[in-house]
Amino acid sequence: MFSRTFTTIVAIALLALGSALAEGEVKRFELVARADVLNIGQGVNFKGFTFNGTSPGPQMVVQQGDTVEITVRNEDTVAHGLSIHAANAQTSNYVGNVMPGETKVVTFTADYPGVFMYHCAPGGHGIMVHTMGGQFGMIVVEPNEPYQMEVELEREPDLKVYLVQHEVYADGRDFFDGKALYVMFNGETFRYVKDPIMARPGDYVRFYYLNVGPNLTSTFHAVGGIWDYIYYGGNPENIMRGTQSVVSGPTDSWVIDWVVPDEGPFTLVSHAFGTQAIKGAVGILQSEEGIDRPNEIRSEGPTNEIEADPKRFVDPFGLGSIDLDSPVRFRSGDHMQIQMVGNSYWPKRAEVPAGSTVTWINEDVFDFLDGELTGKHNAVTVAAEGPEPFFSPLLNHAETFSHTFDEPGTYEYICSIHPYMRAMITVYDDGTTTTRSTSSETTAEHHGH
Ligand SMILES: [Cu+2]
């Protein structure tokens, strides 16, 4: 009798313990959406969007089965949001569109283990351009079953390296064309060439590798090494071994388990040399006997002071430094066309002779929805700037607006629904101009109402 009661109590206690383990813990994070200027290395400042002031944003690590609660706070003046690939749930119902000043919360259960991307998601067209603008990061769900190499070595990794590969674009047209200006690991060109990741021969190293993209496919390789075990998506069940590289399209990820085979520098590289490695996607893992080494390299972008006098200023949506956004000079008789593309104008600086008719065309295709969610654009002179104000209607895809400039001077203009889109027109006097009357027209007559 006593023994049966005792057994029952033990069984209930074990059941309670079991269910507590299965339910996991509650893990809470806060992501603050902002507009920021970042130092991305080599004397270059970058203006974009961030979560919590860095790009990549905060690294989140949870355990499989955990309940994850993420608060998204929008401190910016335009809408932002969040898409979390670690959730097998429609998170856009909760944090898909967070208006300026708003705070929203999403809760989900981390059912699947692995390495996942998260990124801004105000909705529609804005998802793509905000991701390009720097709002992304890594969330890792640690598996409840161990990775194979951990079983074989009977120990945990000596060093965990969380690595996000991502691209920087000079403007929306290059974003369209996949022509990255820089490609980097964890927010800075050649970050781990300047500051190598230290390890020792025989160390068990685990990479949590995520290619954010947003366009390019990478092949991640260590010069002098062969990956012992790779797990696609970071799920221990998706196992392969003995490969020279891992191939990752945008948002693809891997866990890579590797024992450092030797001393010396091991160059970590995207083996797409011309489009990626040469533009900054190179790092060094430096292996030396007895050297002090960290047990973790985190994926957040650096918090370097921004350059007071940068060599270059990258602003994909607005006016970057003149070496990047150099003026395009049109001459009498040219077809003077300015594209709206990827939430920027191209060219961002145009020079036209007085009397010219300039035409804007909207190349952005997603012209549904409104505000940050749409790829509709217009061109509006900044208040009190320039001798001749102009104001276009909102253009849908492939629609145009034309305006004739008679007065020499400099006109700065923006898109009134994406006010961070900024460009300039300089009207010069080429000595041949006869003044005509100013006029504006659009091909989209249904816009007038
Ligand atoms: Cu955003």
Image: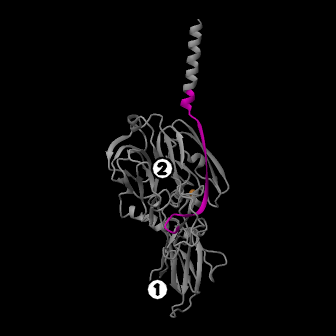
Task: In this rendered view, identify the residue nearer to me: 325 or 408.
Answer: 325
Q: Nearer the viewer, mark 2 or mark 1?
A: 2
Picture quarter with ligand 1: bottom right
Q: Is residue 210 visible?
A: no
- Asked if residue 304 lies in the magenta stretch, the reply is no
Where residue 279 appears, x then y in whole percent?
42, 64
Q: Earlier in the sequence, mark 2 or mark 1?
A: 2
Q: Which residue is mark 2?
A: 292
Q: Which residue is mark 1?
A: 331
Where residue 130 appears, x then y in whole percent?
54, 59
Where residue 197 appears, x then y in whole percent?
45, 53
Between the residue at mark 2 and the residue at mark 1, the CA separation in whole angstroms equals: 63 Å
Picture layout, residue 209 above or below residue 141 = below
Please tell me whether mark 2 sits on a helix, a strand or a loop: loop
| Occupied quadrant, residue 440 | bottom right
Task: In this rendered view, identify the residue nearer to me: 441 or 282.
Answer: 282
- The count of marks equals 2
First to last magenta residue range: 19-44
Neighbourhood count class around disc 2 (C-alpha, 10 Å): few under 14, some 14–19, many 20 upward? few
Q: Is residue 45 visible?
A: yes
Whether label 2 touches label 1, CB < 8 Å: no
Label at residue 9:
none
Task: In this rendered view, identify the residue nearer to me: 59 or 403.
Answer: 59
Where residue 414 appears, x then y in whole percent?
59, 71
Amino acid type at circle 1 is Arg
